[in-house]
Amino acid sequence: MIAALAAAALSACASSQLDVTQPDAMLMDNANNFYSRGRYSQAVDLYRKSVEHNPDSPHRKGAALGLADALYKEKEYFEAALYYERFVELYPLDPTTPRAYFYLAMCNYNDVRSPDRDQANTKKAKDRFTKFAEKYPDHLLTPLAKKFTGEMESRLIESEMEVIRFYHSVNKNQAAIRRIREHIKQYPASPFLEEAQFILGECYYREQSYKEAASVFIALIEKNPAGAYSANATKLAQTIKLQGK
C-alpha cells in the first residue's frame, strides 16, 4: 500500500514537472525559431512570456538574453538596455555576460543624438565601452569597444564646442569662459583647441579683461603662428597694445 502511494506520488510529481518544463521548452523553441528567421517582434512576445510567466524555468536565462537581443534587433534600444543590464546583474559570471554588457553599451551608442542635443547616452556609451575594455581586455569585442570609446569621446568634445560657440554667439562671455577652461583641462588634445583659445581671448576682450585677453592671444600666436585664428588674434592683440589697455 505504502509502495503504491509512493509510486503514485512520484508519478504525479513527474507529471507536474513535465507539464511545467515541456511547454516552456516548446515556447523557447518557437521563440528561437522566430528569432532565427528575423521575425523579431514575434520572438519578443514569446521570450517575454517565458521570462514573465516561468521565473523558475531552466530556460529563463536564455529567454532573458533572447528577449534583450530581439528587442535590440527591433531597435527598441531603451527597453533592450534594461534587459541587458538585468542579465548582467543576475548572471555576472556567465560566459555570455561579456557579450550582454557590450550590447548594453551598444544600446546607448545607437541612441546617441546630434552634437547640439543632450549627450547623456553618449556619455553612458563611452563609460560602458571603457569599462568593457577594462573588464574584458582579451575579449574579441574589445578592439571594437575601444574604437567606439574614441567615437563617443569625439562626439562629447564636439558637443561641448557647440555649447561654447552658442554662449559666445549670444555674448554669454563668463559662461563661455568657464566652459572653455573646463574643455581645455578635460580635452587637452581637442581638435578644437585653437578655436576654443581664440574664443576665450575674445570673451576676455568683451569683458574688458584686456590683460587676460592679450595673454591668450599672444600664447595662441606663438603656438600657431600660421594657424586659422592667428591673424585675428594678432589684430586684437595689437588693438589692445595700441589702446594701452
Image: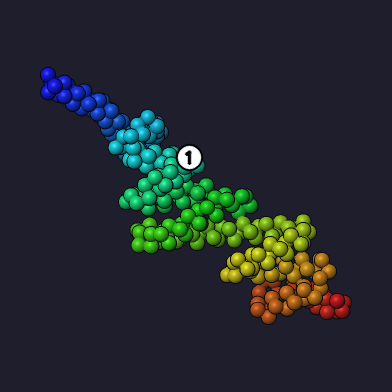
Q: Residue furthest front?
A: 2
Q: Position of residue 154 (x, y in %)?
A: 55, 61
Q: Residue at x 60, y 54 (%)?
A: 115
Q: Quadrant of the N terminus?
A: top left
Left or right: where 31 falls relative to 117: left
Reading the image, the residue beneath label 1 is: 79
- Quarter holding the C terminus is bottom right
Along the viewing direction, whichever of 234 and 43 lies nearer the viewer? 43
Give the secondary structure at mark 1: helix
Tally of marks = 1
Structural crowding at the residue carrying mark 1, measured as other residues with C-alpha within 10 Å and reported as few (<14), some (14–19) or many (≥20): some
Residue at horizontal 18 percent and vertical 26 percent from the top = 10
How far from the left and from the top, in percent, is residue 240?
83, 76
Specify the color scheme: rainbow
Q: Is residue 205 left or right of residue 178?
A: right
> Residue 70: percent from the left, percent from the top?
39, 39
Side (left or right) of 214 relative to 86: right
Q: Quadrant of residue 214?
A: bottom right
| Vertical side of 104 occupied by 189: above or below | below
Residue at figure coordinates x 47%, y 47% from the top left: 107
Asked whether the viewer can see residue 145, the reply is: no
Tell me if I can see residue 210 in this picture.
yes
